[in-house]
Image (cartoon, rainbow, N blue to C red):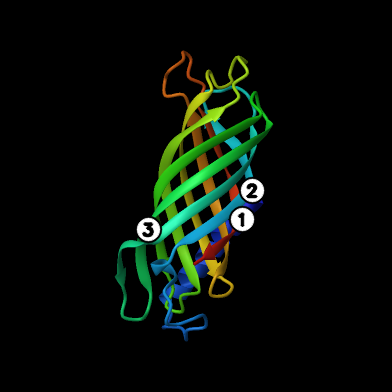
Amino acid sequence: MKRLLLATAASLLCTLSTFAGTPAAPTIAPTINPWDRHAVDFETGMLWKVGGDTPLNYRIVPFMVSWRSPRVIGHDFDNGAALIVRNRLTFMANWFETGAENRYIGIAGAPSIELWSPCKCWALFGSIGGGIGLVDSQGVVGGQGRDLTLNWFGQLGVEHRLNDHLSLRVSSYFQHHSNGGATNPNPGLNSLGALVGLGWTF
């Protein structure tokens, strides 16, 4: 997991260096702003337990499909870069490779905050949000106490456009599950890992 997080951090540093330099020559559809269009992303990866009240060890494989709206607010810089905020809605399905439960399905909403390079081919993005879902609780001590479960997440990553429609996404991802104190004890679960995915802009 440390190597995955280090690789993500290296990608973020490389992206930041592109914003610090001089304006780059546009390479992908210079008249089309990707942030002014809809996008659908598919992401997956691996998450490991990093905290929470549960004593059980968890390893989670997430599958996520997200929709991002065109720009809601933002600022265009003189050199062609842009800082953008978009709506984001994510449908998630988690497979618990280890842990008390087997699967989780849920939905979450968040803003997508994106810093685009002048060439419109790289973006540094982040999201913090949450939602609700269902887990197959097993009645195990230390496991989730009921099926209805709250979630919230934080994500920070890099997006690279491969062409006018397709992009590659790499990110670090934190996820929290709990039942909001509906049971006592409330065995909250914190997990952290890395995601890779593809985005489609239309």
Pointer 1: what residue?
196
Pointer 3: what residue?
86
Query: Closer to the N terminus: mark 1 or mark 3?
Result: 3
Few, some or many residues within 10 Å of mark 3 (<14, 14–19, 20+) = many
Q: Is residue 50 left or right of residue 36?
A: right
Where is 133 relative to 23, above or below?
above
Few, some or many residues within 10 Å of mark 1 (<14, 14–19, 20+) = some
Is mark 2 in CB contact (under 8 Å) with mark 1? yes
Q: Is residue 6 left or right of residue 53?
A: right
Residue 5 in sight from this viewpoint: no
Q: CA distance from mark 3 to mark 2?
A: 23 Å
SS category of the residue bearing label 2: strand
Query: Closer to the N terminus: mark 3 or mark 2?
Result: 2
Query: Closer to the N terminus: mark 2 or mark 1?
Result: 2
Pointer 2: what residue?
45
Is mark 1 in CB contact (under 8 Å) with mark 3? no
| Amino acid type at image mark 3 | Arg
